[in-house]
Image (cartoon, rainbow, N blue to C red):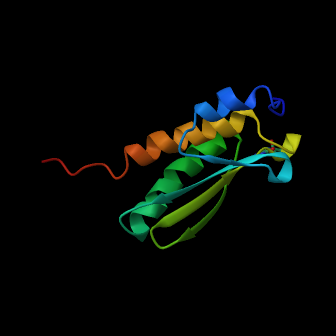
Amino acid sequence: MHKLTSAELPAALAQVPHWRYQDERGGLIARQFVFHDFVQAMGFMTQVALVAERSNHHPEWFNVYNRVEVVLTTHDVQGLSQRDIDLAQAMERIAAAWPPQEPA
Ligand SMILES: C[C@H](O)[C@H](O)[C@H]1CNC2=NC(N)=NC(=O)C2=N1
């Protein structure tokens, strides 16, 4: 795992179009998710927590009611790494499929 170089950044950020890059702390990406209510937000966070633990890469996040604000950066390299991009993509997949639609 290495800190993404400025040459690698554009292609990496193109993989996570909903996320905004910030130059702080050596580089991070941030995103806000909004859900129907608190329970849906917590369900999202619980699913992400399992993925984060499995991949040993953890988000910095803040939840109030139905909103989840997320910052991803890699502490071990003091900047952005591919692990942040991968976790962001996993979060997009989980958010897109959450909540499961009640069977019609
Ligand atoms: C010891 C453990 O492997 C490290 O602390 C892992 C855990 N989760 C992590 N999460 C994030 N976001 N960055 C890291 O550098 C990191 N390192």
Relative to 46, 26 lies left or right: right
> Can you name the residue that lies furthest to the bottom here?
65
Q: Residue at x 86, y 42 (%)?
A: 76
Ligand 1 quadrant assignment: top right
Vertical comparison of 60 with 8: above or below: below
Looking at the picture, how far across and down is residue 14, in whole percent?
A: 60, 32
Residue situated in front as seen by the camera: 91 or 12: 12
Q: Which quadrant of the figure has residue 88?
A: top right
Looking at the picture, how far across and down is residue 85, in whole percent?
A: 65, 36
Relative to 65, 103 lies left or right: left
Q: Residue at x 34, y 53 (%)?
A: 99
Q: Residue at x 87, y 40 (%)?
A: 77
Looking at the picture, how far across and down is residue 30, in whole percent?
A: 64, 52
Residue situated in front as seen by the camera: 57 or 16: 16
Q: Which quadrant of the figure has residue 70?
A: bottom right
Looking at the picture, how far across and down is residue 64, in whole percent?
A: 53, 73
Residue situated in front as seen by the camera: 38 or 78: 78
Q: Which quadrant of the figure has residue 4?
A: top right
Give the quadrant of the N terminus: top right
Relative to 47, 53 lies left or right: right
Q: How many marks?
A: 0
